[in-house]
Amino acid sequence: MRKREALFSVVKHARFTVTAAVALTILYTRSPQVLWTAAGGVACSFVAKLLKTVIRQPRPLVVIEKKVSTPSRTSPPHIITRIFSSHTHGMPSSHTQVTAYFATYFTLYYLVPSSHNPHPPTKPSTAASGILVGLNVFGLIVAWSRVYLGKHTVAQVGVGWVVGTVFAAGWYWAWRCGGAAELVEGWCRIVGFVQ
């Protein structure tokens, strides 16, 4: 398998990788904010599905051409063209929207002061910078792969990125200023989620 195919295989299964990482983080930290962040990812995914049913923009057509050689050397090879269309809608790209949500939320968490992180460093540590850059690069790779693989148009991916980023900012604000922190932390204490 070529390197590019291996990379796309990882990106293709990104939802499983992200879901497993988030679930393990919730179980390990038992943090109300991690639970809130994960709930935001699920909510962001539902928003993408809702927008797809409202906008109803089709995915791009996929055209595959294959040369088939003929038994005779004198006749040119035949070209078989197949056109595939998906029965699902493509606007916005949910993969892109959710990865943009997580990349933006974690960036805001680390760089914007809050009661849980009142004094973010003026210069992030090398490890934190690497994680933030890695998350954002991963998000961009997912977005690019959706276009490269013919699953979405550039516009569908762009709208997914914008909606995911705006949703993350709103979700972070709800935690930081909108009372969600107190609500979720209280609920977690009642059910015994926090240690």
Image (cartoon, rainbow, N blue to C red):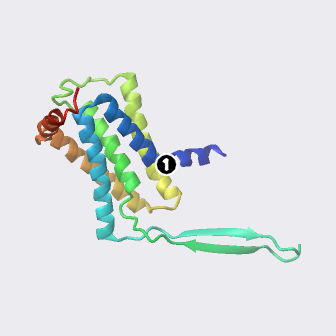
> Quarter-wise, where is residue 131 in the image?
top left
Farthest residue to the right: give it: 73
Residue at position x 35%, y 41% in the image: 103
Q: Nearer the viewer, residue 176 or 31?
A: 31
The correct choice, above or below, for 101 with respect to 120 in the image is: below
Farthest residue to the front: give it: 191
Where is residue 13? Give x, y as percent.
49, 48
Residue at position x 28%, y 58% in the image: 47
- On the picture, is 104 further left or further right than 60? left
The correct choice, above or below, for 143 with respect to 53 in the image is: above
Where is residue 51? Give x, y as percent.
29, 64
Residue at position x 11%, y 42% in the image: 178
Question: Which of the image's four quarters has the C terminus?
Answer: top left
Residue at position x 29%, y 63% in the image: 50
> Quarter-wise, where is residue 109 in the image?
top left
Q: Which of 187 and 113 is in front in this view?
A: 187
- On the picture, is 138 further left or further right than 77? left
Where is residue 36? Give x, y as percent.
23, 40
The correct choice, above or below, for 138 with respect to 73 in the image is: above
Report which residue position mark 1 lands on: 13
Mark 1: which secondary structure?
loop
Farthest residue to the bottom: give it: 75
Q: How many labels does the image show?
A: 1
Where is residue 155? Give x, y as percent.
39, 61
> Quarter-wise, where is residue 32 in the image?
top left
Packing grade of label 1 (10 A; few <14, some 14-19, many >=20) is: few
- On the picture, is 33 further left or further right than 148? left
Amino acid of disc 1: His
